[in-house]
Structures are given as C-alpha cells and as structure tokens.
Amino acid sequence: MASDECWLVCGDRVLASAERANRRSARARGLLGRDGIDGALVLTPCRGIHTLGMRFAIDVAYLDEQGVVIKIAHMRRNRASWPVWKAKSVIEAEAGAFERWGLQVGQQVELRE
C-alpha cells in the first residue's frame, strides 16, 4: 500500500494508529474496497472527500495547516462533501470513532512516527 504507518496524537493522548495516504494513488483509493478500518486514514493534501462506493459510514475531520480540526462531519455511504478550502488534510475513521476518541473542532492533532 502507498501509505505510511504512524500514530494520531492529540495533546498527550494517542487517539489511534493511522495510515498516512500522501501519494495521489493512495488518496484516490482512500478506504474504497475495505470493510472497515482500525484507527484512521489521513489524506494529505486533501480538502474534500466522498463515500461513493464505500461499504461503511465514516467520521471526517478537516485539518488546517497547523493540524487544528476546523470541521467534523459524519458521512453515510454514497455521499460527497463540499471542499473545505482552508483544509490541508483530512482524517477518516469509522463512524463513531471521533466520539470515542473525544475528537472535537478546535483541537490540534499531529501524526507521529
């Protein structure tokens, strides 16, 4: 897979393991073809996503260039989002994950190796 393994961290808390999709092919594929994901997928760069053809609903967090969550959305299957122009990256996780992790707008997250 064209992605890197890392950790999604908020403050001093590790939220989840993460895959970083920083190549065009990995971003285009995203979570398509999967039945779920343990952890998260981080798409960089990215301003908008879709769930067309996906097998499950997802939580989506849009991050600015400092890694601050500027918008959170919960997307059912076969939907498309409007681009979030200030976003530089997007975190995707299975629906309900952000609530379990306590992830909210205004929090700063980072990826650590």
Image (cartoon, rainbow, N blue to C red):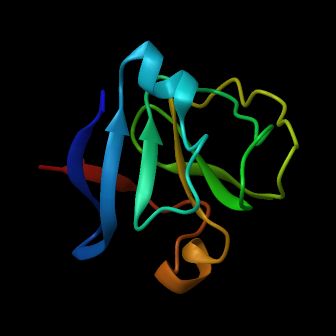
Residue 38 left/right relative to 8 = right
Q: Which residue is drawn at 70% across and 30% down?
A: 48
In the picture, residue 14 is in which quadrant? bottom left
Q: Nearer the viewer, residue 25 or 22?
A: 25
Give the image location of residue 16, x and y in percent.
33, 69
The answer to whether 7 is drawn above or below residue 4 in the figure is: below
Give the image location of residue 18, x and y in percent.
33, 55
In the image, farthest residue toward the bottom: 100
Residue 89 left/right relative to 94 = left
Q: Which residue is drawn at 87% across and 44% down?
A: 78
Residue 66 left/right relative to 81 = left
Number of marks: 0
In the image, farthest residue toward the top: 24
In the picture, residue 99 is in which quadrant? bottom right
Give the image location of residue 15, x and y in percent.
35, 72
The answer to whether 106 is drawn above or below residue 33 in the figure is: below
